[in-house]
Amino acid sequence: MLFLSFVSLAALFGGITSATPATTSHVFTFDCEAAKGPCDTHCFARFCGDLDYTTKGFHFDGTYTKSRPRKGSKGTVADYRGAAIGCGVRNPCESLGLSCDEVPYASTYDGGLGCFAQGKTGVYYSGTIHCVPVGEHAAFNKLLTTFYESARLRDGDKL
């Protein structure tokens, strides 16, 4: 079984672990056999896109599901970050019956090429997208969301 682990992102497939509340760096690990497409996206980002998230980490945005880029916006900041990198409403994956996966995640200040990261230092302004099977992407997103909730991440914590 192949596992992908982020030195600086802590959820084990089947069991969640997290750092103490005083710690601001967390490790997220997932089973690549359960989510091959998202695993490939991470490999592309790391080895083809030169995103060294293993040492730098991503920066969690604690408001990603609630905040709007501006008053009257229909989508959340995460929606706009997805669109900025190419995973918007009409993306190249949809016509193939696939889901658009992005790294860095739209739930981080690094996502969407650094969109809406004003005042944050050390964020990425690059990224990658990859078309992946819908079920694998949904499974990965569920693992990531469960990790966020279990780790009790605070705004700006490193993954």
Image (cartoon, grey):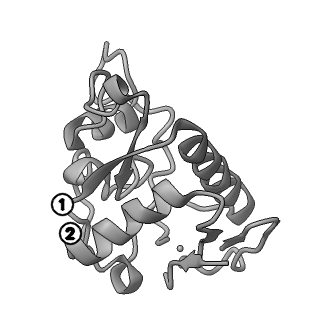
Quadrant assignment, res 69: top left
Q: Secondary structure at mark 1?
A: loop
Tag 2 residue? 49
16 relative to 47, above or below: above
Position of residue 56 in the picture relative to residue 119 (left or right):
right
Cβ atoms under marks 1 and 2 closer than 8 Å: yes
Position of residue 48 in the picture relative to residue 31 (left or right):
left
* Kind of residue indicated by mark 1: Ser
- The residue lying toward the viewer, choosing from 146 and 65, is 146
104 relative to 23, above or below: above
Q: Residue 152, position in %: x, y?
A: 68, 61
Q: Residue 96, position in %: x, y?
A: 36, 29
Quadrant assignment, res 49: bottom left
Quick one: quadrant of the N terminus?
bottom right
- The residue lying toward the viewer, choosing from 63 and 52, is 52
> What residue is shown at x 25% (from left), y 45% (from top)?
116
Camera-near label (1 vs 2) is 2
Residue 26 visible (yes or no): no
- The residue lying toward the viewer, choosing from 22 and 56, is 56
65 relative to 151, above or below: above
Tag 1 residue? 126
Q: Residue 87, position in %: x, y?
A: 30, 36
Q: Residue 105, position in %: x, y?
A: 40, 53
- How many marks the image carries: the answer is 2
